[in-house]
Image (tube, rainbow, N blue to C red):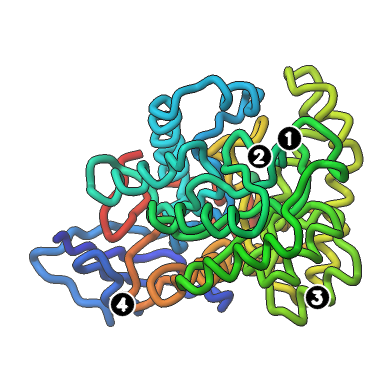
Amino acid sequence: MEQIVFRGGKLIDGTGKAPVEDVAVRIENGRFKTIGSMNEVTISEKDTIIDTTGKTLIPGLINLHVHLCLEPDEDSQSFCMKESTVAMALRSLKNAQIALTHGVTSVRDLGAKGGVNLEVKRAIEAGWFQGPRIFASGPCITAVGGHGHFIGTEVKGQEQVRRAVRENLEAGADVIKFMASGGLLTSGGEKEMAVLSQAELEAGVDEAHRAGVKTAAHATTADGVRAAVNAGIDTIEHATFLDKKGVRLLKQRGAAVVITLTPPYLIEFMGSDTGIKPEILEKSRGRFSQKLSSFKMLLEEGIPIGVGSDAGTPLNGHHDFAREIELMVQHGGVSPLEAIRSATQLGARLLGWEDRIGTVDEGKLADLVVLSGDPLENIVNLRRIEMVFKNGKRVLL
Ligand SMILES: [Zn+2]
């Protein structure tokens, strides 16, 4: 395995600590070996030396909410219903590679037709293809006719929920995804759409947790959030129409929220004349400011806010994770340093991988991004990607 030493530049290590200047970082056997000043980190003949003077080093980014099988510029519901699972797997691989070359070394894929996210994960792990580390849910679990039924398993009753969870676990799922409310992108009224009941969610969470696997629930409505939190879900996805009661519950139960600011932003402000269905445009009106008010409630109460872009929803490309972080900073008032911590260290914690990824720390897997601009000066510099490393291996851009 290659030995690499980065010399010079600024290190933002992902912990939220102030950056360190004139740093040197040694990678050995796919892991961070030593991190220190330029004279602390010695060089040997076998090392590949990379001069990073004037650059900024950050941990590989973690996108906690993606759909690799979905294409951002299409009506996902219709194409999902007609495309084969083989085509979906190939598309997912292509999208996974796009994410990686844009600095995202880990993704959590929360719903794929036929569980193709699990196949793509395995193909990458086997070394067949370059790609990010994928934490995959398999198909999501939803009520009959419920939100996301075109990428999920439709169930009715606690026994069917338990069975669907077990099938996903058997297939190798890293996380189990439930639908606890209606949503923006499935035809039908968001508040009237069929949803999993509290009892069904509880059964599903019980089945997953007994296997030591974390759970995520799509919940946009206040009712959906409450039901999901009460059922013991680990991460609530979206929380668009959050209320005070929901925030109190989140705090009591120690759950986190993956807010996904990008889809309402793009659909509401850039969606007209793009071919997005009028029904969806109508549902999205006022949605971004609604989302921001939920975001601020979470910030005020100190609820952990994980960073996920919901890539694969309309207009929301797999190259564009930086946008989610930009929106947190530019509209949510979060500092760039804190936003980067959320997209790295906190992401790792919510995956249950905080001992392996998420920070530039001795012994951790060497996921690293080299930027030609400083994101603390301007968060848009997160897009100025020069090099990406995953497991200590340089990614071909
Ligand atoms: Zn989603």
Q: Nearer the viewer, residue 245 or 29?
A: 245
The amino acid at mark 3 is Leu
Do callouts 4 and 2 mark residues in contact (Cβ within 8 Å)?
Answer: no
- Crowding at dot 3, Cα within 10 Å, few <14 / some 14-19 / many 20+, comes out as some
Q: Residue at label 4?
A: 363
Nearer the observer: mark 2 or 1; the answer is: 2
Q: Nearer the viewer, residue 51 or 95?
A: 95
Say whether residue 371 is visible.
Answer: no
Q: Nearer the viewer, residue 74 or 104?
A: 74
Mark 2, secondary structure of its residue = loop
The amino acid at mark 1 is Leu
**Res. 185 mark:** 1
Q: Earlier in the sequence, mark 1 or mark 4?
A: 1
Nearer the observer: mark 1 or 4; the answer is: 1
Q: Residue at label 3?
A: 249
Nearer the observer: mark 4 or 2; the answer is: 2
